[in-house]
Image (cartoon, grey):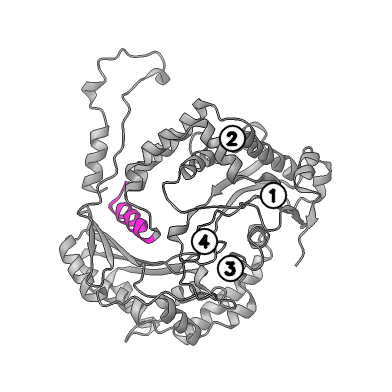
Amino acid sequence: MSRVLALALLAAVPFPGSVTAQAIPERPEDLRFAPSVFEPPPVSGLRFELGNGLPVYVVPDRGLPLVDVVVALPVGDRNEAAGEDGLASMTAAMTRRGGAGESGPDELDDEIDALGARIQASSSWGRTVLVLDSGAESLDRGLELLASILFEPRFDDARLEQAKENLRVSLLAEADDPRAVLEREWLRLVHGPASPRSRRLTQASIAAFDRDALARFHRRHWSSRGAVIAASGDVDAEALVARLDELFGGWKPRPPEADAKGLPQGLSAESAEQAAPAAVSPGWWTIDRPGTQAALAFGHRGALFDSWDDPDRWALMLLTEILDGPGTVSRLRSRLQLEEGLTYRVLTHFDLDVIAAAADSDRNRGMGEFRVFLETSPESTVAAASVVLEEVRRLLRDEVPENEIATARQSLLARLPLLFDRAEAIAGLYAEDELLGRPHEYWAVYRERLLAVTAAAIREAARRFLAPERSVLLVVGGRKAATRDRGLDALRDALGAPRPVSG
């Protein structure tokens, strides 16, 4: 835990003498304490810039002789062109596995191991990260290796063929995994077959991976534009920044690529428009398969905002917490698991994308989604789906009681300190702010904005951004039981009769 955070938490904890004045209650729930208000640690003094303008966030923590350094780039699957499915992730993985600079892959592995360090590289939809975990005494050489991996990857052919074979095997096994099948078809139904989010890794796309393709993607997209570095641990901030400047200060940005219309990425006039949340192919879809377990997903595309401080974002945060948050309030978990015993697991998320953070000219390219995921027995699929539909409709119809909003609000606020509970977390979160275009002030007003959300605002946000009748209900397994279960009429009225997924 960082010293700054420890002091902040200490200030919020009452000393023993402060509670002796109250009488000892008969029951624990009758205890009363003054509310503690968490204040995020100030970002001043943590942000630096290299000579090329690359931002660096450093949070020293002398508790252990360990250092964590993360280089993050706004590059990922969304940068892949047609026919390049999976290329962003393979490029990131092979920068680490395929050797770098003067070192072949085996030599690189051996030196990193000899340092007692760890270097990893990975990529997702919108970002690529390289992570160095090192002891303080071996940090300097670890940083040199990290820079070599970032700037001079060798993309060794033998290692690449090994990685491709592993992908081929995992792709063959995907057909036997209900969750993998659901994920693949869900993206196609919700975002449309033409969306970059719906691209599927295939044997043909794996075969297209070669050293030249990886090198081209790396050369085209890996630049200092929009990148950020986060560092934490047993370091002197000024000395570390000076060393980072030697290694990374000459990293040059490349101009943003133009899209097919000739517009720079992120500058499309369309991207600032509010997109309808409907799924591209709404309705009830099924994939019939034998087994004792069914997987189910319900939802549609997400919302798009042009500001992190849009009032609807704060209302939707509370709405999602009320519907199915990980805290003390969850309407879906209460009904599906505790009251009716219909599901093994329920997971809900609502992406609240901000246009200013997306380097995409097509508004659908950056769009997230609203999704409820369930695992249940085949005979319970319709009953479980009916509960989800009922609860979503209830949010549109009725205002949420004030006590439920208060519980959801407190649950979100109680988790806020956990985002700043370690030096590594503080550096990473403030660096992520920079990567996403999220102002640091977001965290300073977090409590105030949540307290300002009303029941009426939550219902209005639900009516604007939830579209149950334009959603996808996808069930993998359990189709035969669907005709005999309760809730069938309500689902058919909302989504139509179940149709098998084809293609």
**Residue bearing mark 1:** 470
Q: Main secondary structure of the magenta part?
A: helix
Chain part drawn in magenta: 420-435
Residue 331 badge: 2
How far apart are the alpha carbons under marks 4 and 3?
16 Å
Residue 196 badge: 3
Residue 117 x, y percent position in the rendering: 31, 68
Q: Identify residue type, mark 4.
A: Ser
At x 33%, y 52%, the residue is 425
337 and 74: which is toward the camera: 74
Residue 9 x, y percent position in the rendering: 27, 38
Residue 145 x, y percent position in the rendering: 30, 76
**Is 183 left or right of 229, judged from the image as shown?**
right
Q: Is disc 2 surrounded by few (<14), some (14 to 19) or many (20+) residues within 10 Å? A: some
Q: Identify residue type, mark 1.
A: Arg
Name the quarter where the C terminus is drawn.
bottom right
Contact? badges 1 and 3 (CB < 8 Å): no
**Is 249 left or right of 371, judged from the image as shown?**
left
SS for callout 3: helix
SS for callout 2: helix
Point out the tag, 1 or 4, that comes first from the N-terminus: 4
**Residue bearing mark 4:** 271
Q: Identify residue type, mark 2.
A: Arg
At x 32%, y 47%, the residue is 441
- Residue 304's place in the image compared with 454, above or below, is below
5 and 266: which is toward the camera: 266
